[in-house]
Image: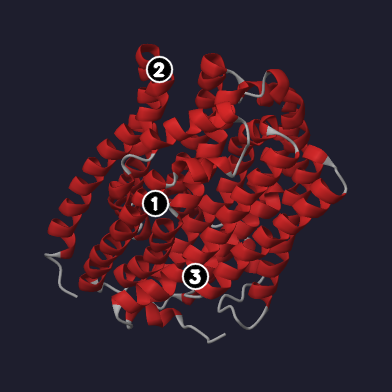
Amino acid sequence: MARVSAEDLGTQPIGKLLIKQAVPASIGILVMSLNIIVDTIFVGNWIGSIAIAAINVVLPVSFFIAALGMAIGIGGSSIISRALGANDKEKALKSFGNQLSLTLLLTIVLVFFGLLFVEDIIPKFGGKGAIYEPAKIYYTIVLYGVPFLALCMMGNNVIRAEGKPKFAMIAMIIPSVGNLILDYILIYVFDFGMAGAAWATTLSYLLCFGYILWFFMSENSELKINLSHFNLSKKITSEIASLGSVTLARQAVVSIIYLFMNNILFDIGGESSVAVFGIISRVMMFALFPVLGITQGFLPIAGFNYGARSYSRVKETINTSVLYASGLAIVIFVFLMVFTEQIVSVFTKDATVIDQTVYAMKWVFLAVPIVSVQLIGSAYFQAIGKAIPALLLTLSRQGFFFLPLVLILPYFYGEFGVWISFALADFLSTILTAYFINREVRLKLNTTSD
């Protein structure tokens, strides 16, 4: 694999550089998403649709803890990208060491309390009725592996900040492939049911952690830290926290949304409606993988060039990223609308669940063609270290718009009110983001010379 220098982020043509960064990220997200999709298919067909609902109950809890690693990774990687762009390698090393310390401390504490209050957490996230027991089995086992997942999420962002997207891609592929193989062995061959699904997931996190540990200990990484870099610096941890709070707040809102969605849908339609949301949430993870890949590729390029004060390249990166992402989003939208029933039928043979999901998906994905503006726009402010606008724009879609809509509209329109809330939130947040990113380009990037 060819060595890639961080300095390439500031010298290569933007279009070529974006593709080089985004394609591995997209492949990694695709494989990870396919893993979640196939995992859900295995569980739905080998255990039952109730098992899909059970996993959907557990995901927001385990993902929130894992999101700490992602938040610390993205927050610290913004510092690393800008520090490397400014030739301040010591700051980059200190940031990486602090990221490791923070991830370990916070995730271990949260896992402890997550296991301590398991009986209270599961029902609150919609684990009621027939869903409770399988959700408890899955939750308890998966939580043991979540600290390793958090370290993987953190390390993956640091690898990308170094300008090593291919290694980051491999780090995402390893647990995905491992999980699918282990699913087959533990669920299908040994018939371990929900416990098998949970152990397959947990062991796949360990495989990913082993690879990322190897990367940073090998010559492939430019970040060779020592024990002094693990000592927490108030200045660096504050900057990591302010920037990482954007990602963490987003995932916190996602967890809250899952809490409300699972409970609202259970009250409206019982276990089958929760299963519908479980399928839709998996398709959402999978469908936008190329757009999310471009967003991931955009972050280190924008951060590095902003740190190097190459503002014309930053502006070009924004424009190129939005153009590429929007084109892909339109293709995705058409595919989802044309093949809705075929997509849903892969997950379950339950005719009621299939009919409900096909109807819901048409509304949920209605605004897909415009979401790239919101994703790239909010990512820009995170990449350049402006935490407050990044936080507000990131929260706009799910927190400021979707959450109020999904709490209000079902009272008037029932289950339809839940599904239409997705498209309305996408539309409103895109308008808001477009205004702020246009204002930033006019006031900052157009008026400041390189």
| Residue type pointed to by label 3 | Pro
The structure residue drawn at horizontal position 88% and vertical position 48%, both measured from the top left corner, is: 190
Q: Mark 2 points at which residue?
A: 410
Of the numbered discs 2 and 3, the one sitting upstream in the chain is 3
Q: Quadrant of residue 126?
A: top right
Q: Name the residue under label 3.
A: 24
| Residue type pointed to by label 2 | Pro
Viewer-closest of 403 and 159 = 403
Label placed on residue 335:
1
Label placed on residue 69:
none
7 shown above or below 142: below
Rate crowding at label 2 as few (under 14), some (14 to 19) or many (20 or more) other CA atoms within 10 Å: some
The structure residue drawn at horizontal position 71% and vertical position 55%, both measured from the top left corner, is: 179
Q: Distance from label 1 to label 2 (Cα)?
A: 28 Å
Q: Do the residues labelled 2 and 3 touch (CB within 8 Å)?
A: no
Rate crowding at label 1 as few (under 14), some (14 to 19) or many (20 or more) other CA atoms within 10 Å: few
43 left or right of 381 in image: right
